[in-house]
Amino acid sequence: MVSLRLECAAEQKDELVAALWEDGTQGITETDLNANRVELRAFFEEEFDAAAYAAHGAHWESEPDIDWAAETRAAWPGRLIGERFWIVPPWNEDPTPEGRVRLVINPGVGFGTGADLTTQLCLEALERELRPDDVVFDFGTGSGILALAASSMHTKKVLAADIDTDAVLMAKEDLPPSVGLFIGSIRSIRDGSIDLLLANLNAETITNHAAEMARVLRPGGRVIISGVPPRHGERVVKALTANGIPPREILERDIWLRIVCQASN
Ligand code: SAH
């Protein structure tokens, strides 16, 4: 495999990318350089006359042959998360470590591959907070990972929703049919029906939906929140507290907070 490397001004990029696809490239990478310039690297099976790109300093370089299937496998190792979970992509054949639940998630799809810290923070709280007769709602399910984890722990009922249609269609592939998955949001959940609410969203969405989250919780219901950076923590905590779901635990790890709240009994 070879690559044609060239450099251009940012505003010329789209035109060049279109021309490279037209010339049959198998893929293009872009690197932002200084002063509004971009380096393009277009991959081809073999060299051709690239005179049309000469003005952009185009030159050929040979590229090592890469086994993309093997690279992808290496990029998605099984992950041990918390005390209970073992998250793997569908092609992983490693045995499940003793005492763990195997969660199979296709990493190509939606947010929530298990690699993100916010997802991990939610999973760690989930294994501790979940009770066998809980009704769980995964608000913004993405890949479905939190709903899958909850259902693997044999809780009473798991509901999951996302406003992103593609995410829901893909999550459907990885979730058992017992999970009540739908395209939509928290508005479709009945008043006082949820014991454990999972909300790995952003600060704004959580603040704007604090009243809705309080509405759907049963007395004593719990909420696991992540996706909030520390600088927005105060605003989010204020909104939650004002709606009767004050934080009972706040954990800061790297650039994220995890907040566990509880409604009064
Ligand atoms: N729960 C997964 C994914 C979190 S990413 C995990 O923990 O890894 C957040 C998801 O919430 C995205 O898929 C986004 O589409 C969805 N989302 C954002 N706002 C929403 C809203 N108002 N209602 C429902 N889903 C929402």
Image (cartoon, grey):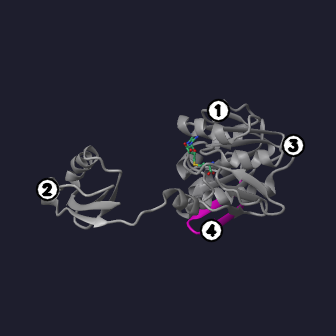
Residue 133 found in image quarter: top right
127 left or right, relative to 112: right
42 left or right, relative to 95: left
Image spot of residue 129 (x, y percent): 80, 54
Mark with earlier residue (1, 4): 1
Whether pointer 4 and pointer 3 mark residues with C-beta atoms closer than 8 Å, the reply is no
**Residue with the mark numbered 1:** 182
Height in image: 221 above or below 40?
A: above
Whether pointer 3 and pointer 1 mark residues with C-beta atoms closer than 8 Å, the reply is no
Whether pointer 4 and pointer 2 mark residues with C-beta atoms closer than 8 Å, the reply is no
Image spot of residue 195 (x, y percent): 79, 43
Which residue lies at the image location 35% right of the left edge and 60% below the top edge?
A: 1
Q: Which label belongs to residue 253? A: 4
Which residue lies at the image location 67% right of the left edge and 51% below the top edge?
A: 241
Q: Is residue 263 visible?
A: no
Other residues around mark 1 within 10 Å, as few (<14) / some (14–19) / many (≥20): some
Other residues around mark 3 within 10 Å, as few (<14) / some (14–19) / many (≥20): few
Local secondary structure at mark 3: loop
**Front one among 8 and 226:** 8
Disc 1 to disc 4, C-alpha distance: 31 Å
**Residue with the mark numbered 2:** 51
Mark with earlier residue (3, 2): 2
Height in image: 181 above or below 237?
A: above
Mark with earlier residue (3, 1): 3
Mark with earlier residue (4, 3): 3
> Nearer the observer, disc 4 or disc 2?
2
**Front one among 152 and 205:** 152
Q: Is residue 27 visible?
A: yes
**Residue with the mark numbered 3:** 133
Local secondary structure at mark 2: helix
Is 26 part of what is drawn in magenta?
no
